[in-house]
Image: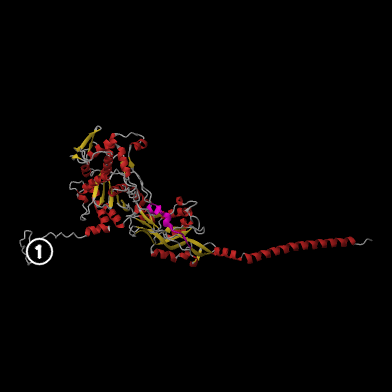
Amino acid sequence: MSEPSIFFTEVNERQGAFHRRSFLLGGFAGAGLLALGGRLAHLQLLEAQRYEKLSASNQFNFRLVPPPRGLIVDRNGQVLATNRPNFRLLVVKDGEHEPAPTLKTLAHFVPLDEARQARLLKEFERTPNRVPVSVMEDMTWEQFSAINIRAPEMPNVTADMGEVRVYPHGGAFAHVIGYVAKVNREDLTETGPNSEAILLHPGFRIGRQGVEKAFDLDLRGRTGARKVEVDARGREVRNDPGGDIQAVSGKTVELTLDVDIQKRALEVMDDESGAIVVMDCRSGDLLCMVSAPSFDANRFVRGLSVAEYRALADYERRPLLDKAMSGTYPPGSTFKMTTALAALGAGIDPEERVFCSGGWRFGGRTWRCWRHSGHGSQNMHEAIKNSCDVYFYQVALRMGPDHIARAAKALGFGQAFDIGIPGQRTGVVGSTEWKRTRVKRDPTWHPGDSVSYGIGQGYITANGLQLAVMTARLANGRKQLNPRLIKSVGGVEMPPGDEVPSLPFSQEHLDYVRAGMIAVANDARGTAFRQSQLGLGDVLMAGKTGTAQVRSYDGVADRDSRSVRWGLKDHNLYVAFAPIDQPRYAISVIIQHGGLGGATAAAPRAREVMRVALLKDPEIRARITQPLPMPDVSDLPPTGMAPDGSVIAPPPETGDPV
């Protein structure tokens, strides 16, 4: 019988394998515990500060705060654009509360009709989650309170106080200043200032036209932030004012315009369509730039309905068009000073006379003068004073268009001036080269083109700003003044408009043309004598009337357009400067389709606006109000003696007039 040695050997082997495996697993477990302990120690001792910050960032968040938009002021510091408090209603699309039911609930407390709700729902679709949408602006205190009382029932609804842009003078500066509006998707860019997150804030506005658009980045300021405590879903729990980052206001933009002159200009325009521009003849500063009819820019800030916008856009007098810069018109007889300067430069004798019988036969047609009975024999001075068309027909034909074009460009026609805001249309200054390259259907300059060109018709158009520049350069008599609209930005002065080259005309020729303008307004037989009297003592105004036709009068005996519909009436113009001895201010007035003639429709308006400009000038006002000089009595005989030595009887003492 054999011994059971094999049995014990197997048991020992199994026990050895078990112990080896136990030690191996124990080693793995120990290594794992050691690694875990080391990691915990690392997190607790070395990474504690980092994770404390991350935890705080999960607990606290920053909400962007739009900065107060910079002010826009006039030359005297009067505010033209500012900000005011605004109660607004915001709704956040958070993925938990659908906006449609929320809007229906809010409609019980604020006016939200079905159409408005439909537009807001489309805006919610375009807006990312967690970004609030402005549902209503300018809530009343009652509406604001009603929403805030029910805030716990509507966690995605907020009624707070922000700022809204306001224009204190309504439509007086609408075209120059422009307005602000909400940011569109087209405004956003991937890089640059328009890529910042603040643009998605419901209280942020961007400049749309005029100064607001051109200096938008300067006016924006620097964005701030409000520190808030949030819950796990990102909803605000409470504010933490100690961590707020203050917003920095935008820069102040100072214009050269004057509130009083601008408002008076819009007032005298009444219901007419057109433009008035006033320019300083010494510095080039623009004191007034009005386009009429205007619109209230405050309505654009709040947002226009489709019907409201269509009413403005479809009105035939086009209130949305800036007629001072973007509207171009034939200058009519206000262009005759340019033709006269060109003629003098071309060597035409100003004393050479042309006979005006009321019409002139040329090219198979009769070119009529505005005065049907004619002006008789005219030299250049008389032709300017009487605005004789026949004289300038013939003078323009003799010298051709290129002399006129050179003079026109030197006086500012055909130019877009760097005044800081966009929107200028340069108009047309005709020449043989211009017609060859621009009029493909008929590139040849014909003699008849020169005839109409001489009186400011045909291939010549200008805007109100260019007419004011022309008048200011003539009045200055030395420099090619440029207009300046922006006086300073953030306290930094902008370059003046008088750092320019000299005019390419002789002083003698300029004096001659100005003398013609003085006669227009001060000679009893001038075309605008009665309408140009300022009533300011010895301060007198020089000017030139203009009537620009918009339809052909060939074969028509009477050019009176008062009986035709508005769109077919003549344009009426007047340009002027004052005082005549020391010119300070130049003005241009355009009455679109006025139909009455420059002397009747435009000149009286120019006079009223010029009076305001002159009376606001301290030096001119002192000149007007100074007492009359006392007579020189040094050569008079002693009191009581007549020049022949006889005694003069004393006056009666009864107080009765002598």
Q: Is residue 206 magenta?
A: yes
Is the residue 559 above or below the residue 193 in the image?
above
- Residue range in magenta is 203-225
Residue at the extreme top of the image, as rendered? 364
Q: Is residue 93 left or right of residue 164?
A: right
Residue 429 x %, y %? 33, 41
Q: Quadrant of residue 651?
A: bottom left
Give the labeled residue for mark 1. Answer: 639
Which residue is rendered at x = 20% and y = 46% of the image?
A: 526
Q: Residue at x 63, y 67 (%)?
A: 45
Q: Is residue 450 above or below residue 256?
A: above
Find residue 259 and report its horizontal and vertical position in percent.
31, 57
Color style of the picture:
secondary structure
Circle 1 packing at 10 Å, graded few (<14), some (14-19), many (20+), is few
Q: Can residue 338 be seen at all in this image of the molecule? A: yes
Query: What percent of the width, then of the height, locates residue 404?
Result: 30, 40
Front in this rendered view, residue 173 or 534: 534
* Residue 234 highlighted magenta (yes or no): no
Amino acid type of the residue that numbered disc 1 sits on in the rendered structure? Thr
Could you say which is closer to the camera, residue 394 or residue 442?
394
